[in-house]
Image (cartoon, grey):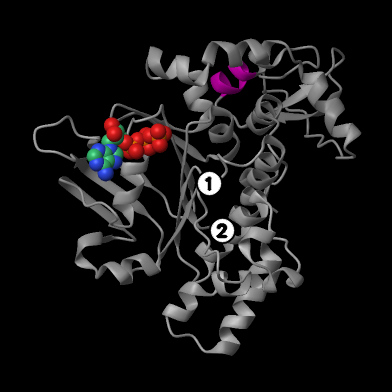
Amino acid sequence: MAQSGEIVFEGVSKSFTDGSIPAVNGVSFRVAAGNMVVLLGPSGCGKTTLLKMVNRLYDPTEGKIWLGGQEIHTLPVNELRRHIGYVIQQVGLFPHMTIRKNIAVVPRLLGWDDQKIDARVEELLDLIGLPTSYLSRFPRQLSGGEQQRVGLARALAADPSILLMDEPFAAVDAINRERLQGELLGLHCKLAKTILFVTHDVEEAFRLADKIIVMRAGKVVQYGTPIEIVTHPADAFVEDLVGSNNLLRRLSLVNVQSILKAREEMGIPAVLPEADAEETAVLRPEDDLRSALSLLLSSGRDTLRVENASGIPLGEVGFSDLRSMLFAAPSSKKKNCQ
Ligand SMILES: Nc1ncnc2c1ncn2[C@@H]1O[C@H](COP(=O)(O)OP(=O)(O)OP(=O)(O)O)[C@@H](O)[C@H]1O
Protein backbone atom coordinates (compact mmCIF):
# COMPACT_ATOMS: atom_id res chain seq x y z
CA MET A 1 0.00 0.00 0.00
CA ALA A 2 1.23 3.46 -0.82
CA GLN A 3 2.47 5.22 2.31
CA SER A 4 0.52 8.37 1.63
CA GLY A 5 -2.32 8.81 4.12
CA GLU A 6 -4.86 10.26 1.69
CA ILE A 7 -8.41 8.94 2.25
CA VAL A 8 -11.04 9.06 -0.49
CA PHE A 9 -14.71 8.05 -0.18
CA GLU A 10 -16.68 7.78 -3.41
CA GLY A 11 -20.44 7.25 -3.27
CA VAL A 12 -20.16 5.12 -0.12
CA SER A 13 -23.31 3.71 1.53
CA LYS A 14 -23.84 1.19 4.28
CA SER A 15 -27.15 -0.49 5.10
CA PHE A 16 -27.40 -2.93 7.96
CA THR A 17 -30.67 -4.51 6.87
CA ASP A 18 -32.12 -4.86 3.39
CA GLY A 19 -34.44 -2.08 2.43
CA SER A 20 -33.69 0.08 5.47
CA ILE A 21 -32.47 3.68 5.19
CA PRO A 22 -28.68 3.39 4.98
CA ALA A 23 -26.73 4.32 8.12
CA VAL A 24 -24.24 5.99 5.73
CA ASN A 25 -25.87 7.23 2.57
CA GLY A 26 -23.98 8.10 -0.62
CA VAL A 27 -21.00 9.79 0.97
CA SER A 28 -18.08 11.23 -1.05
CA PHE A 29 -15.14 13.25 0.28
CA ARG A 30 -11.36 13.43 0.21
CA VAL A 31 -9.05 13.87 3.18
CA ALA A 32 -5.58 15.12 2.23
CA ALA A 33 -2.62 13.23 3.70
CA GLY A 34 -1.57 14.68 7.06
CA ASN A 35 -4.87 16.43 7.76
CA MET A 36 -6.89 16.03 10.94
CA VAL A 37 -10.53 15.78 9.89
CA VAL A 38 -13.30 15.62 12.47
CA LEU A 39 -16.64 13.87 11.83
CA LEU A 40 -19.25 15.85 13.72
CA GLY A 41 -22.94 15.16 14.03
CA PRO A 42 -25.72 14.07 16.36
CA SER A 43 -26.03 10.59 17.83
CA GLY A 44 -26.94 7.96 15.26
CA CYS A 45 -26.00 10.02 12.18
CA GLY A 46 -23.50 7.41 10.97
CA LYS A 47 -20.09 8.68 12.18
CA THR A 48 -18.89 5.41 13.69
CA THR A 49 -20.24 3.37 10.79
CA LEU A 50 -18.31 5.60 8.38
CA LEU A 51 -15.11 5.25 10.41
CA LYS A 52 -15.42 1.48 10.67
CA MET A 53 -15.57 1.15 6.89
CA VAL A 54 -12.05 2.61 6.64
CA ASN A 55 -10.45 -0.32 8.48
CA ARG A 56 -13.04 -2.78 7.17
CA LEU A 57 -14.75 -3.54 10.44
CA TYR A 58 -17.76 -2.91 8.17
CA ASP A 59 -17.88 -3.25 4.40
CA PRO A 60 -19.79 -0.70 2.33
CA THR A 61 -22.96 -1.83 0.62
CA GLU A 62 -22.12 0.57 -2.21
CA GLY A 63 -19.24 2.75 -3.29
CA LYS A 64 -15.48 2.65 -2.93
CA ILE A 65 -12.85 3.77 -0.44
CA TRP A 66 -9.23 4.48 -1.34
CA LEU A 67 -6.33 4.87 1.07
CA GLY A 68 -3.09 6.21 -0.34
CA GLY A 69 -4.45 5.70 -3.84
CA GLN A 70 -5.38 2.05 -3.32
CA GLU A 71 -8.93 0.70 -3.11
CA ILE A 72 -9.13 -0.97 0.30
CA HIS A 73 -10.71 -4.21 -0.90
CA THR A 74 -7.71 -4.91 -3.12
CA LEU A 75 -5.61 -5.49 0.03
CA PRO A 76 -5.65 -8.35 2.53
CA VAL A 77 -7.44 -6.97 5.60
CA ASN A 78 -4.44 -7.48 7.93
CA GLU A 79 -2.16 -5.64 5.56
CA LEU A 80 -4.70 -2.80 5.39
CA ARG A 81 -5.03 -2.55 9.17
CA ARG A 82 -1.25 -2.45 9.63
CA HIS A 83 -1.36 1.04 8.11
CA ILE A 84 -4.26 2.19 10.29
CA GLY A 85 -4.17 2.94 14.03
CA TYR A 86 -7.51 2.68 15.82
CA VAL A 87 -8.38 4.42 19.11
CA ILE A 88 -11.79 4.07 20.73
CA GLN A 89 -13.59 5.52 23.73
CA GLN A 90 -13.42 2.31 25.76
CA VAL A 91 -9.61 2.27 25.21
CA GLY A 92 -9.61 -1.54 25.03
CA LEU A 93 -6.28 -2.15 26.80
CA PHE A 94 -5.78 -5.80 27.76
CA PRO A 95 -6.26 -5.81 31.56
CA HIS A 96 -3.96 -8.77 32.24
CA MET A 97 -1.04 -7.29 30.26
CA THR A 98 1.44 -4.69 31.48
CA ILE A 99 1.61 -1.33 29.73
CA ARG A 100 4.78 -2.51 27.96
CA LYS A 101 2.97 -5.55 26.57
CA ASN A 102 -0.12 -3.56 25.65
CA ILE A 103 1.88 -1.08 23.58
CA ALA A 104 3.88 -3.91 21.99
CA VAL A 105 0.86 -5.90 20.77
CA VAL A 106 1.03 -4.90 17.11
CA PRO A 107 4.86 -4.93 16.72
CA ARG A 108 4.83 -8.42 18.26
CA LEU A 109 2.16 -9.55 15.78
CA LEU A 110 4.35 -8.16 13.03
CA GLY A 111 7.25 -10.28 14.28
CA TRP A 112 9.64 -7.49 15.29
CA ASP A 113 12.61 -8.62 17.41
CA ASP A 114 12.66 -7.85 21.15
CA GLN A 115 15.26 -5.12 20.90
CA LYS A 116 13.34 -3.22 18.24
CA ILE A 117 10.09 -3.61 20.21
CA ASP A 118 11.66 -2.33 23.46
CA ALA A 119 13.15 0.68 21.70
CA ARG A 120 9.80 1.49 20.05
CA VAL A 121 7.81 1.09 23.29
CA GLU A 122 10.15 3.44 25.14
CA GLU A 123 10.08 5.96 22.31
CA LEU A 124 6.25 5.93 22.37
CA LEU A 125 6.07 6.26 26.13
CA ASP A 126 8.25 9.33 25.87
CA LEU A 127 6.03 10.68 23.09
CA ILE A 128 2.89 10.39 25.23
CA GLY A 129 4.66 11.86 28.25
CA LEU A 130 4.54 8.93 30.70
CA PRO A 131 7.57 7.80 32.75
CA THR A 132 9.22 4.45 32.03
CA SER A 133 8.24 3.28 35.52
CA TYR A 134 4.73 2.87 34.07
CA LEU A 135 5.86 0.08 31.75
CA SER A 136 5.49 -2.60 34.41
CA ARG A 137 2.09 -1.34 35.60
CA PHE A 138 -1.26 -2.82 34.61
CA PRO A 139 -4.05 -0.72 33.03
CA ARG A 140 -6.12 -0.67 36.26
CA GLN A 141 -3.21 1.15 37.94
CA LEU A 142 -3.56 4.11 35.54
CA SER A 143 -6.07 6.96 35.44
CA GLY A 144 -8.59 7.14 32.58
CA GLY A 145 -6.56 9.85 30.85
CA GLU A 146 -3.32 7.86 31.21
CA GLN A 147 -5.02 4.77 29.82
CA GLN A 148 -6.21 6.81 26.87
CA ARG A 149 -2.61 7.97 26.23
CA VAL A 150 -1.45 4.35 26.28
CA GLY A 151 -4.26 3.49 23.83
CA LEU A 152 -2.89 6.17 21.53
CA ALA A 153 0.69 4.87 21.90
CA ARG A 154 -0.53 1.38 21.06
CA ALA A 155 -2.31 2.66 17.96
CA LEU A 156 0.88 4.44 16.85
CA ALA A 157 3.18 1.48 17.55
CA ALA A 158 3.65 0.24 13.99
CA ASP A 159 3.84 3.81 12.66
CA PRO A 160 0.55 3.75 10.71
CA SER A 161 -0.05 6.49 8.15
CA ILE A 162 -3.68 6.86 9.26
CA LEU A 163 -5.27 7.12 12.71
CA LEU A 164 -8.97 6.51 13.31
CA MET A 165 -10.18 7.92 16.61
CA ASP A 166 -13.74 7.24 17.74
CA GLU A 167 -14.75 9.59 20.57
CA PRO A 168 -11.45 8.78 22.31
CA PHE A 169 -11.79 11.41 25.02
CA ALA A 170 -15.54 11.20 25.68
CA ALA A 171 -15.20 9.23 28.92
CA VAL A 172 -12.45 11.47 30.35
CA ASP A 173 -13.23 14.40 32.68
CA ALA A 174 -13.28 17.91 31.19
CA ILE A 175 -9.84 19.01 32.45
CA ASN A 176 -8.07 15.90 31.21
CA ARG A 177 -10.00 15.99 27.96
CA GLU A 178 -8.65 19.45 27.24
CA ARG A 179 -5.14 18.31 28.12
CA LEU A 180 -5.43 15.25 25.86
CA GLN A 181 -6.73 17.42 23.03
CA GLY A 182 -3.68 19.66 23.41
CA GLU A 183 -1.38 16.64 23.40
CA LEU A 184 -3.06 15.22 20.32
CA LEU A 185 -2.52 18.53 18.52
CA GLY A 186 1.14 18.46 19.54
CA LEU A 187 1.51 14.90 18.28
CA HIS A 188 -0.25 15.75 15.07
CA CYS A 189 2.22 18.59 14.49
CA LYS A 190 5.10 16.25 15.17
CA LEU A 191 3.95 13.13 13.34
CA ALA A 192 1.76 14.55 10.53
CA LYS A 193 -0.52 11.49 10.44
CA THR A 194 -3.85 11.62 8.66
CA ILE A 195 -6.44 11.53 11.44
CA LEU A 196 -10.19 10.87 11.18
CA PHE A 197 -11.66 11.81 14.54
CA VAL A 198 -15.29 11.21 15.56
CA THR A 199 -17.02 13.41 18.10
CA HIS A 200 -20.37 14.97 18.84
CA ASP A 201 -18.71 17.65 20.94
CA VAL A 202 -18.69 20.86 18.88
CA GLU A 203 -15.99 22.56 20.96
CA GLU A 204 -13.73 19.53 20.57
CA ALA A 205 -14.30 19.48 16.81
CA PHE A 206 -13.37 23.14 16.49
CA ARG A 207 -10.26 22.80 18.64
CA LEU A 208 -8.83 19.87 16.76
CA ALA A 209 -9.93 20.01 13.16
CA ASP A 210 -8.14 21.16 10.06
CA LYS A 211 -11.49 20.40 8.44
CA ILE A 212 -14.86 19.26 9.74
CA ILE A 213 -17.31 16.87 8.09
CA VAL A 214 -20.78 17.63 9.40
CA MET A 215 -23.08 14.59 9.13
CA ARG A 216 -26.81 14.23 9.43
CA ALA A 217 -28.87 11.05 8.91
CA GLY A 218 -26.08 9.26 7.06
CA LYS A 219 -25.20 12.12 4.73
CA VAL A 220 -22.44 14.71 4.65
CA VAL A 221 -24.16 18.07 4.91
CA GLN A 222 -20.99 20.18 4.96
CA TYR A 223 -17.25 19.68 4.64
CA GLY A 224 -15.05 22.67 5.34
CA THR A 225 -12.59 24.39 7.64
CA PRO A 226 -13.95 25.40 11.06
CA ILE A 227 -13.99 29.06 10.08
CA GLU A 228 -15.87 28.28 6.84
CA ILE A 229 -18.44 26.26 8.74
CA VAL A 230 -19.02 28.93 11.35
CA THR A 231 -19.19 31.77 8.88
CA HIS A 232 -21.00 29.96 6.05
CA PRO A 233 -23.09 27.14 7.53
CA ALA A 234 -24.61 25.11 4.69
CA ASP A 235 -28.10 25.16 6.20
CA ALA A 236 -30.11 25.78 9.34
CA PHE A 237 -29.14 22.38 10.74
CA VAL A 238 -25.40 23.19 10.60
CA GLU A 239 -26.05 26.68 11.88
CA ASP A 240 -27.88 25.28 14.89
CA LEU A 241 -25.36 22.49 15.47
CA VAL A 242 -22.29 24.72 15.55
CA GLY A 243 -24.09 27.70 17.05
CA SER A 244 -22.98 30.09 14.29
CA ASN A 245 -25.07 32.95 15.63
CA ASN A 246 -23.75 32.43 19.07
CA LEU A 247 -20.14 32.36 17.88
CA LEU A 248 -20.54 35.55 15.92
CA ARG A 249 -22.04 37.09 19.00
CA ARG A 250 -18.98 35.95 20.93
CA LEU A 251 -16.70 37.50 18.33
CA SER A 252 -18.50 40.80 18.62
CA LEU A 253 -17.74 40.90 22.36
CA VAL A 254 -13.96 40.92 21.91
CA ASN A 255 -11.83 43.58 20.20
CA VAL A 256 -8.50 43.54 18.34
CA GLN A 257 -6.74 45.25 21.23
CA SER A 258 -7.47 42.29 23.51
CA ILE A 259 -5.57 39.98 21.13
CA LEU A 260 -2.53 42.29 21.12
CA LYS A 261 -2.74 42.53 24.91
CA ALA A 262 -3.00 38.76 25.38
CA ARG A 263 0.10 38.30 23.21
CA GLU A 264 1.99 40.93 25.17
CA GLU A 265 1.07 39.21 28.42
CA MET A 266 2.39 35.93 27.05
CA GLY A 267 5.67 37.65 26.08
CA ILE A 268 5.08 37.11 22.34
CA PRO A 269 6.81 39.96 20.45
CA ALA A 270 4.57 41.99 18.12
CA VAL A 271 5.12 41.51 14.39
CA LEU A 272 5.24 45.01 12.91
CA PRO A 273 4.69 44.75 9.16
CA GLU A 274 5.84 47.50 6.83
CA ALA A 275 3.14 50.11 6.20
CA ASP A 276 1.74 49.81 2.68
CA ALA A 277 0.18 52.96 1.27
CA GLU A 278 -1.86 50.88 -1.21
CA GLU A 279 -3.41 48.74 1.51
CA THR A 280 -6.83 49.90 2.56
CA ALA A 281 -7.76 46.89 4.70
CA VAL A 282 -6.32 47.84 8.07
CA LEU A 283 -7.62 47.06 11.53
CA ARG A 284 -7.89 49.43 14.46
CA PRO A 285 -7.33 48.21 18.01
CA GLU A 286 -10.88 49.09 18.96
CA ASP A 287 -12.46 47.05 16.10
CA ASP A 288 -14.44 44.10 17.36
CA LEU A 289 -13.52 40.66 16.06
CA ARG A 290 -16.73 40.33 14.10
CA SER A 291 -15.70 43.33 11.99
CA ALA A 292 -12.15 41.96 11.87
CA LEU A 293 -13.53 38.70 10.47
CA SER A 294 -15.54 40.54 7.80
CA LEU A 295 -12.48 42.55 6.78
CA LEU A 296 -10.28 39.44 6.66
CA LEU A 297 -12.82 37.62 4.49
CA SER A 298 -13.41 40.54 2.13
CA SER A 299 -9.68 41.29 1.79
CA GLY A 300 -8.88 37.64 0.97
CA ARG A 301 -5.89 37.79 3.33
CA ASP A 302 -4.95 35.54 6.24
CA THR A 303 -3.69 38.42 8.40
CA LEU A 304 -4.18 42.17 8.51
CA ARG A 305 -2.09 45.01 9.89
CA VAL A 306 -3.31 46.74 13.04
CA GLU A 307 -2.70 50.49 13.18
CA ASN A 308 -3.68 53.16 15.65
CA ALA A 309 -5.47 56.33 14.53
CA SER A 310 -2.13 58.01 13.75
CA GLY A 311 -1.16 55.21 11.36
CA ILE A 312 1.42 53.70 13.74
CA PRO A 313 1.57 49.90 13.22
CA LEU A 314 0.84 47.89 16.37
CA GLY A 315 0.99 44.34 15.01
CA GLU A 316 -0.89 41.82 12.91
CA VAL A 317 -4.09 39.89 13.53
CA GLY A 318 -5.37 36.95 11.50
CA PHE A 319 -7.79 34.03 11.32
CA SER A 320 -5.76 31.95 13.76
CA ASP A 321 -6.09 34.70 16.39
CA LEU A 322 -9.86 34.82 15.95
CA ARG A 323 -10.03 31.10 16.25
CA SER A 324 -7.91 31.11 19.41
CA MET A 325 -10.14 33.74 20.95
CA LEU A 326 -13.24 31.72 20.09
CA PHE A 327 -12.10 28.29 21.10
CA ALA A 328 -9.16 28.95 23.41
CA ALA A 329 -7.27 26.61 21.08
CA PRO A 330 -4.10 25.19 22.65
CA SER A 331 -1.05 27.00 21.32
CA SER A 332 0.28 23.82 19.74
CA LYS A 333 -2.47 23.85 17.09
CA LYS A 334 -1.13 22.74 13.75
CA LYS A 335 -1.21 26.25 12.32
CA ASN A 336 1.32 27.12 15.00
CA CYS A 337 3.53 24.06 14.44
CA GLN A 338 7.14 25.13 14.64
N1 LIG B 1 -24.15 -3.22 13.77
C1 LIG B 1 -25.27 -2.56 13.51
N2 LIG B 1 -26.41 -3.20 13.14
C2 LIG B 1 -27.54 -2.52 12.84
N3 LIG B 1 -27.63 -1.19 12.88
C3 LIG B 1 -26.54 -0.49 13.23
C4 LIG B 1 -25.31 -1.13 13.57
N4 LIG B 1 -24.38 -0.18 13.87
C5 LIG B 1 -25.02 1.01 13.75
N5 LIG B 1 -26.30 0.84 13.36
C6 LIG B 1 -27.30 1.90 13.10
O1 LIG B 1 -26.74 2.78 12.17
C7 LIG B 1 -27.03 4.15 12.49
C8 LIG B 1 -25.74 4.92 12.62
O2 LIG B 1 -25.03 4.45 13.79
P1 LIG B 1 -23.57 4.99 14.17
O3 LIG B 1 -23.12 4.20 15.34
O4 LIG B 1 -22.73 4.99 12.96
O5 LIG B 1 -23.91 6.50 14.58
P2 LIG B 1 -23.01 7.57 15.32
O6 LIG B 1 -23.19 8.84 14.57
O7 LIG B 1 -21.62 7.06 15.47
O8 LIG B 1 -23.72 7.66 16.73
P3 LIG B 1 -23.12 7.98 18.21
O9 LIG B 1 -22.65 9.41 18.19
O10 LIG B 1 -24.33 7.79 19.08
O11 LIG B 1 -22.03 7.01 18.46
C9 LIG B 1 -27.86 4.09 13.75
O12 LIG B 1 -29.20 4.19 13.39
C10 LIG B 1 -27.55 2.73 14.34
O13 LIG B 1 -28.63 2.25 15.08
Q: Is residue 193 toward the left or the right of residue 141 in the image?
A: left
**Which disc, if any, is residue 219?**
none
Q: How crowded is mark 1: few (under 14 residues within 10 Å), some or many (20 or more)?
A: many
Identity, as a three-letter code, of the amino acid under mark 1: Pro
Looking at this view, is 315 or 15 the one in front? 15
Above/below status of 260 relative to 47: above
Q: Give the range drawn in magenta.
A: 293-299
Ligand 1 within 8 A of label 1's CB?
Answer: no
Looking at this view, is 196 or 171 the one in front? 171
Q: In which quarter of the image is ligand 1?
A: top left
Residue bearing mark 1:
168
Residue 337 position, x and y percent, is 67, 51
Residue at x-position 87% and y-position 26%: 261
Residue 232 position, x and y percent, is 45, 19
Residue bearing mark 2:
152
Q: Is residue 295 toward the left or the right of residue 244 in the image?
A: right
Instruction: Name the main secondary structure of what is drawn in magenta.
Output: helix
Q: Is residue 299 toward the left or the right of residue 258 in the image?
A: left
Residue 237 position, x and y percent, is 39, 16
Q: Is mark 2 on a helix, strand or loop?
A: helix
Above/below status of 157 relative to 59: below
Marks 2 and 1 in Cβ contact (< 8 Å): yes
Above/below status of 46 relative to 284: below
- Reply yes or no: does residue 90 show up in magenta: no
Identity, as a three-letter code, of the amino acid under mark 2: Leu
Cα–Cα gap, marks 2 and 1: 9 Å
Q: Is mark 1 on a helix, strand or loop?
A: loop
Residue at x-position 55% and y-position 19%: 298
